[in-house]
Image (cartoon, grey):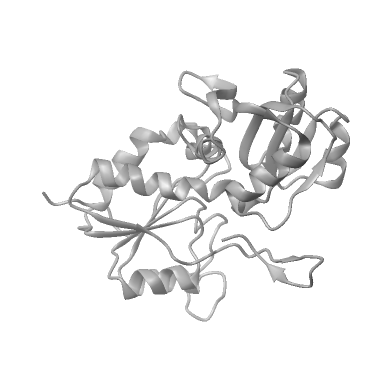
Amino acid sequence: MITSANHILEALFEWAPPHLKEDYDNIGLLVGRKDHVINRVLVCLDVTEKVVDEAISKGCELIVAHHPIIFKKLSHVRDDDDATKLIYKLVKWDINVICMHTNLDAASKGVSFALAERLDLIETSFLTPTEEQAGFGVIGRLSKPQNKEDFLQFIAHCLQLPMIRYHGDGQKIERIAVCGGAGAFLIQKALDLKLDAYLTADLKYHDFFQGTDSFLLCDIGHYESEIPIVDKIKEYLDIRFSSLTTEVTSVVTNSVNYYTSNNETTKST
């Protein structure tokens, strides 16, 4: 069976319908053509030059990414402009790009559910349901309570985190919420539900003041909180399209480095 870029796009939209996206967002087939026959797919969080080079070397006709490669209005597409040279390269090598961003954040079994699964949370559901089978953030429970120190060590191990920014000193962590990406807007919801902890990313200094001593508020990093969805996209495509060869990028696209006290500069893997 011949599989086109549009077949893959329609299948992904069954999982994360386009109407779930935020108004500011840009999703769908952002580079390429719908009738392009696809045999090999590379899945990633971010479309970077190293990812595109990997797709070229592996003969992939399609890249499926979480973050949009085109987000702001473009005035031109040239190979001598840092903002557009990657798009130029994709077109030159006839590589299509599908991006599934805030619609996949809000979808059932989407970004936050992938994060919750990585942490082995049970009894999961949307933290803030917005409509049937959609919402933001995920609430769940650990299989057994943990103290603060064990819990921080646990999430660092599960997510391969070099560091965690946090506030709070709760010593019985069991009911928690997570939100992949920038989730400061859900802090109050987690507090209202009297949860023990909330994990998200991109928290500002004053966001931590919303917490309480008994509530553990953790910033685990944007890349780190969203990277679990990449494996889930691959799994979904493997199930839907047996004729495709789909793999996850080997490139770590996290642009954030961490300088730790042992004088080593590290980043998540």
Above or below, 47 relative to 21 = below
- In the image, residue 81 lies at what x, y percent? 55, 76
| Residue 44 visible | yes
| Residue 93 visible | no
- In terms of depth relative to the viewer, which is nearer, 95 or 66? 66
Q: Quadrant of residue 203?
A: top right
Tag count in the figure? 0
Residue appearing at x 51%, y 70% in the figure: 84
Q: Quadrant of residue 258?
A: bottom right
Residue appearing at x 45%, y 50% in the figure: 230
- In the image, residue 263 lies at what x, y percent? 79, 72
- In terms of depth relative to the viewer, which is nearer, 234 or 263? 263
Above or below, 32 relative to 109 = below
Q: Quadrant of the C terminus?
A: bottom right
Residue 167 in the figure: left or right of residue 144? right
- In terms of depth relative to the viewer, which is nearer, 79 or 127? 127
